[in-house]
Amino acid sequence: MTMIIRGGTVVNADRAFRADVMTFGDKIVAVGENLEAPHSARVIDAHGQYVMPGGIDTHTHMNLPFMGTVTQDDFFTGTAAGLAGGTTTIMDFVIPSPQQSLLEAFHTWRGWAQKAAGDYTFHVAVTWWDDSVREEMGILVRDHGVNSFKHFMAYKNAIMADDETLVNSFRRALELGAIPTVHAENGELVFQLQQDLLRRGLTGPSSHPLSRPPAVEAEAANRAITIAGVLNTPLYIVHVSCAESLEAIARARANGQRVYGEALAGHLVIDDSVYRSADPEFAAGHVMSPPFRSKHHQAALWHGLQAGNLHTTATDHCTFCAAQKAAGKDDFTKIPNGCGGVEERMAVVWDAGVNTGRLTPSEFVRVTSANAAQIFNMYPRKGVIAVGSDADIVVWDPEGTRTISAKTQHAKGGFNVFEGRTVRGIPSTTMAAGKVVFDRGVLMAEEGAGRYVERPAFVPVSAKS
Amino acid sequence: MTMIIRGGTVVNADRAFRADVMTFGDKIVAVGENLEAPHSARVIDAHGQYVMPGGIDTHTHMNLPFMGTVTQDDFFTGTAAGLAGGTTTIMDFVIPSPQQSLLEAFHTWRGWAQKAAGDYTFHVAVTWWDDSVREEMGILVRDHGVNSFKHFMAYKNAIMADDETLVNSFRRALELGAIPTVHAENGELVFQLQQDLLRRGLTGPSSHPLSRPPAVEAEAANRAITIAGVLNTPLYIVHVSCAESLEAIARARANGQRVYGEALAGHLVIDDSVYRSADPEFAAGHVMSPPFRSKHHQAALWHGLQAGNLHTTATDHCTFCAAQKAAGKDDFTKIPNGCGGVEERMAVVWDAGVNTGRLTPSEFVRVTSANAAQIFNMYPRKGVIAVGSDADIVVWDPEGTRTISAKTQHAKGGFNVFEGRTVRGIPSTTMAAGKVVFDRGVLMAEEGAGRYVERPAFVPVSAKS
Amino acid sequence: MTMIIRGGTVVNADRAFRADVMTFGDKIVAVGENLEAPHSARVIDAHGQYVMPGGIDTHTHMNLPFMGTVTQDDFFTGTAAGLAGGTTTIMDFVIPSPQQSLLEAFHTWRGWAQKAAGDYTFHVAVTWWDDSVREEMGILVRDHGVNSFKHFMAYKNAIMADDETLVNSFRRALELGAIPTVHAENGELVFQLQQDLLRRGLTGPSSHPLSRPPAVEAEAANRAITIAGVLNTPLYIVHVSCAESLEAIARARANGQRVYGEALAGHLVIDDSVYRSADPEFAAGHVMSPPFRSKHHQAALWHGLQAGNLHTTATDHCTFCAAQKAAGKDDFTKIPNGCGGVEERMAVVWDAGVNTGRLTPSEFVRVTSANAAQIFNMYPRKGVIAVGSDADIVVWDPEGTRTISAKTQHAKGGFNVFEGRTVRGIPSTTMAAGKVVFDRGVLMAEEGAGRYVERPAFVPVSAKS
Amino acid sequence: MTMIIRGGTVVNADRAFRADVMTFGDKIVAVGENLEAPHSARVIDAHGQYVMPGGIDTHTHMNLPFMGTVTQDDFFTGTAAGLAGGTTTIMDFVIPSPQQSLLEAFHTWRGWAQKAAGDYTFHVAVTWWDDSVREEMGILVRDHGVNSFKHFMAYKNAIMADDETLVNSFRRALELGAIPTVHAENGELVFQLQQDLLRRGLTGPSSHPLSRPPAVEAEAANRAITIAGVLNTPLYIVHVSCAESLEAIARARANGQRVYGEALAGHLVIDDSVYRSADPEFAAGHVMSPPFRSKHHQAALWHGLQAGNLHTTATDHCTFCAAQKAAGKDDFTKIPNGCGGVEERMAVVWDAGVNTGRLTPSEFVRVTSANAAQIFNMYPRKGVIAVGSDADIVVWDPEGTRTISAKTQHAKGGFNVFEGRTVRGIPSTTMAAGKVVFDRGVLMAEEGAGRYVERPAFVPVSAKS
Ligand SMILES: [Zn+2]
Ligand SMILES: [Zn+2]
Ligand SMILES: [Zn+2]
Ligand SMILES: [Zn+2]
Ligand SMILES: [Zn+2]
Ligand SMILES: [Zn+2]
Ligand SMILES: [Zn+2]
Ligand SMILES: [Zn+2]
């Protein structure tokens, strides 16, 4: 079926221009002024609105098993919430247990993701090392469309990767044409600081940020960057939350190294005063790692996006309800780490980024989809409004407003870190794979409609055939 | 007339892909695989080659009157040389004398440029200040398609702009939606160092770099950046030649400031050993400002391009013959400053950039045309292979080689700073405004075929009509 | 007459140790444990106290003629206030008008200073340039004990030194063995920002900091550093107030350049909220340049002192009464710039520095006297408790407290920027030139007792005679 | 017996001045002009010479057991060589094997050191961790005068300390008033790079520097700094060899952190071209870790000393003969790491530092003894010419020259990394503990005359008794 989005301003990473956008099936088939469409074509009016690539959230955890329970959002509710917010693709994480087969874990996650309403793809975590892991990384790249591997530098005594694993895995990724990514926090220091705080009786959620200060994050970022630099691999650092990590990235980039950084919507606008709330449930609701930081760090993150030292925006969407969070009410180290955001990211980044003049609309597209698509090799299928690209489109009403609340959100968990924030600039229509899945506040997400996105290995461009 | 470039790999700033490119008149009319073309269409075979946007040289001085003489290349020979090298657009400089009307100078330069074989546009220099200058800046922006103004921070007692002029002009540019640019060297220090060296009898060309050390450039860059930052204007710094200037740019950008930097092909590959040559003519032939620097600085400039702290590559093409250079044989400060390069830039940057793995082909396009077109508001007319864009195209043979020499160059002046360098990767065909102007070594440049490119003021993107 | 300070802990820049200190006449004659003193010796009990070199305030303006009026403190009241606070030497500024003879101005200031109660010496400002200035700089160094020259990079249309003057004067200082110093603010930007603010009707004192943002200071610091670096002179930057200036110093120092920085007691502990006071008199009372900054900058200044990137603490003591400040009530640019502090500096730096653990007592001595004495060639006459040194000594009671107030201060002007601050750690006794001039709250300053301190030119150390 | 050094220029860290120096027994008893000495006093003529504190080499390995063999220099020959070069105190390392008692190792080293001719003291390495180690650290500090603990971040599968050990040991040091020190290289990366090189057949000594690039050192330095910063301990980094490590130190210091750095004489003047020698024995003779670096890094290290970002100079004296070095002739990883230098350090640093104008004589004293004495709590017993200090004195002839050679050195091993270098500025007389041990080329070192120097824990200075 043909659809035509008429009269809007198309925004791509390189420019914005007046054009209609026509889709057929799941693809964009025409972009231009005053397109002729068949009579049967469904028309979406975009006058006074922007027409942008659907968002890519590079960092979510749907259906994540954790401490004997599981996150509130599964792949259906999570991707559906994303569609409501203009995000049409998520990048989730396969996290094998130490000693578990990567392939086995990959298939488990693939199974969970069958019900997804929007497109999805997977980073696969390397949480341990032996020859079988090396082997399975190859199979994942060659046969399963995985081109990024995740490493946790925190979470001692669990999934923490030591330097030996990092070195082995980064080098293997290089051989395979995959990109390593890291959660950068020095797990040993976190552990010691946690123990200190607990010993001193500081068991509440206000201890959480004290156990994970910026220096702890920056150290790990710098270490991962060094390893990548020495081995000559690119590197992607997830959820950069502080000025010091960002400086490590900027230093490496200024030295010619290919390092990419991700900022979370939450880190961009929420500060660490939340942990000092008198309401421990409220504070616990904000427990995630790295924690929210002071305003100084928020300003730095925006500068990073402006300068091109940070490249993507994501959410680390990982929802737990109050009952789950309560597991840590006597010991902050037992609070399940995670917050939502997949539904709010686009609007929050627009409101705090474009409305304030920090970002142009094209830069917004860059940091909400285009860069992600390029870094993770989904471009131009994703991340651009162009002929041949997936018909993943968000029609963006720059004057529309919404007051964010857990009461009205589509995601589950009953909590929202952006609670009460009124944003100007919201999706009026989201199209995914050529279908209207959200329109003027009505979500029409369809369970199982989402597709697994294969991401081929990186290969050098050659003019030869 | 329809032309079709068949079988190549199109390279844009965002990606490279197999596609044919069809042009009609002066525009690109189709880009796609296996395009159907009319039988009458002229076919250019691009198998095994890259098809890229024609180069934009952001910094040339054709027909420049200087010390009672004039540069060797006029707008015809200079732009023709550019076409032979794959550069289809030059950005030249209107340089009014102090007290001269900007408009008068602009029209003088427009007259000289009538004979250009390739497209051209002008930065206009602000070399003095009063209300008439303010007024004429407005006229140039509104009526003449000028959106960039140049300021010389060097050349004391001549065209040097002091801080008062910089402040006034930068602020005026902001009002008008134009971007200020600077030649960054502290003119007072250069003057004093020159006098010192002359006093000490060090009159030869080897004194030239000693009179313009990196710190002198970095100071001015930092000062211009501060002024731009305080006034909230963007800034473009021409011919960044040293690590210290680049660091000033990187610092500002990391702080969210919109600063852009230009690297010259010469600065990227030639080092300051040329000034220590036993042959004073050879040394004088390399006298330009800023001077060539040590290899340490070359490495830094490449890192700047990789990191996105530098954005464009140019040449400062400004050719003087040996007789002209000889004016300074007893006093290095009287050597006319300038070197060529408009013909060699693309090949030199490809060879030293892409062949070495420093840059991808897409990054090559970014720094040879796309960024320039975006920064100076000629995009997407220039800088991209896309439907509707100017048919300014270079078919690039990655296996072709050429040994650069003054003997075989198209530019005038009888000297070549890249003399003897063999590059791999050269244009096989250049198309400008839809016409083949260079093909397999044969230049078919036509006097007067070049067009003046109007560059409108910058305005915010709005979804409203 | 012999005096002996018994039982204290002597603190020098290199260490702290238990020792008695004996003086005779104006000199220290013995330092050691259990010194034997003549029966006639006056004994000062220092048990439980520190015995430190008298403070050196490197930056004061006593008796400064300004806008047809003169500062409240003359050399008697100003130095007396210093003695009450433990400061025994001030470094004041001779500020010739443009075109005025430096020598003439020097003698004028020497005349005013005759009444000083404490020792004093002069930086001489170079506010213009011609051969006579060059000549007189030589006379001042050779015949008058001046080894430092000051340059104002701000105050356009008044005493601002342009780059030409800076270059000439810095180079002359180098020849003479003198050190150049600068007030670093870009005068052109300050002027333009002031005009902007006035044009917009923002005429109150809250505009003062807006007209002098950190970037304006950092630019000038960086420029002076570059000039000094290119000419190979050392450089001393007065009243460094912001992180960005400090970074310029740290960068230069890390690159091996000999750059020194001064922090004002006020900048270390007072933030820019004072300018947002509802009481315009209060705000005007805090108008000085550079202005007070945000807490972020205060933290940076402390780090600078800890790291050795800043070297001295001073006050820029320059007192105006409310009536004088009122001259700018309708135009903030007409508020006489200046605040007091010569009396409070030592206690404020101790309280906020040593009590908090930021500085050790030895570091306190370094930044309150020893470094100043070394940088300005008064060492070891000043800045150390050692045999042969001047008997300028402060006995410091680390448990004594004082609540600072204009009501109880010895300085004039009726205003105190530290009003209401309670400090722990105060002088119990001040000895100047071997005489007790302040003891347990009683000031015994004697008009005219202060001496002019000649500071010889710097010469290389040689083992040869 | 009284001795008097007449007519020299005493150089301390804070200043240089003409004075005689009188000693009695092992102490300095008077410093002053024209001292009266008993007739019996032995007079040392120092006219035209400098009189400086004896050098402290903060980093030596005498008698080190290694790979079934032992270093060529034992505590007698090593300290004797030091005395010949003006170094009167060495700081050596007790290196327990993993699982070995620290106390047991300490006593072993104490036994070996009985024969020392010059004073010595020990850093004790923490190479593993459990409660007994924690306990023994306390005993060493309280009962044995140890206040510094060393950690190797390199040497995987041997003595490498992982983050857990670093965190535990740093924190324990803080409790005890001791300072942690680190050998900073990422052991995992070194190991992997070594394996890579060997796999590729690159088994010769030219592979040594390739296996330990600057980034590997900088990463570890940054990590140790972060751990120290988070735990709020000071930190001393041994043998800083590259710009990147130094930058990590400078960053931390600029942020107020108490980090100290040591430069080796060899790293200051020898570059990595030695590893590319055609003579593998010559190359192997230079194998030490970190390796010699390019000239860029040498310049940076000098800047570090000038800026106060580096504090001490040492040698890592650790001599192996050609036969020992030959153990690695087929595998560079088996070459015993180590070079000499204890005898040459003072002259090399003077010649390349003071003669070139990089350092003043006072700064020379700072970086060869005074800072070391202060950082490791031996001051003012060591590191200063003052009454009460140890009579460890070097009379320095600034015009004396010596051409360094293994043929004429006192140290053993038959190899000298400074071979053929002619230095100007050499010790004419060395006095240790009040005895002349070296005079005009004649070494009079006495086995067993050296004393163990106890270094008490650091405690806050208080005016209270
Ligand atoms: Zn994470
Ligand atoms: Zn996550
Ligand atoms: Zn220029
Ligand atoms: Zn130019
Ligand atoms: Zn000032
Ligand atoms: Zn002042
Ligand atoms: Zn070591
Ligand atoms: Zn060692």
Image (cartoon, coloured by chain):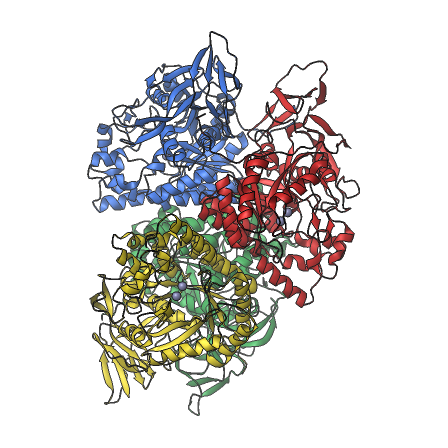
Chain colours: A yellow, B green, C blue, D red
Q: Can you name the residue that lies furthest to the right here?
A: D407
- Tell me if residue D26 comes above or below residue A143 in the rendering: above
Image quadrant for the C terminus of chain D? top left
Q: Is residue A408 left or right of residue B176?
A: left
Residue D144 percent across, percent down from the top left: 59, 36
Identify which residue, C437 or A165, lies in the foreground: A165
Q: Can you name the residue that lies furthest to the top here?
A: C40
Identify which residue, B154 or A202, lies in the foreground: A202
Residue B334 in view of the camera: no
Name the image quarter holding residue B37: bottom left
Q: Can you name the residue that lies furthest to the bottom here?
A: B39
Q: What is the count of numbered marks?
A: 0
Q: Residue at x 40, y 68 (%)?
A: B373
Identify which residue, B56 or B30, lies in the foreground: B30
Name the image quarter holding residue B375: bottom left
Residue D345 percent across, percent down from the top left: 67, 40
- Tell me if residue A190 comes above or below residue B428 in the rendering: above
- Tell me if residue A358 comes above or below residue C304 in the rendering: below
Q: Residue at x 53, y 65 (%)?
A: A165
Image quadrant for the N terminus of chain D? top right
Q: Is residue D35 left or right of residue A174?
A: right
Q: Residue at x 66, y 57 (%)?
A: D208
Residue A208 in view of the camera: yes
Residue A109 percent across, percent down from the top left: 40, 76
Q: Is residue B441 left or right of residue B461?
A: right
Identify which residue, B228 or B316, lies in the foreground: B228
- Tell me if residue A132 comes above or below residue D120 in the rendering: below
Residue C217 percent across, percent down from the top left: 38, 42
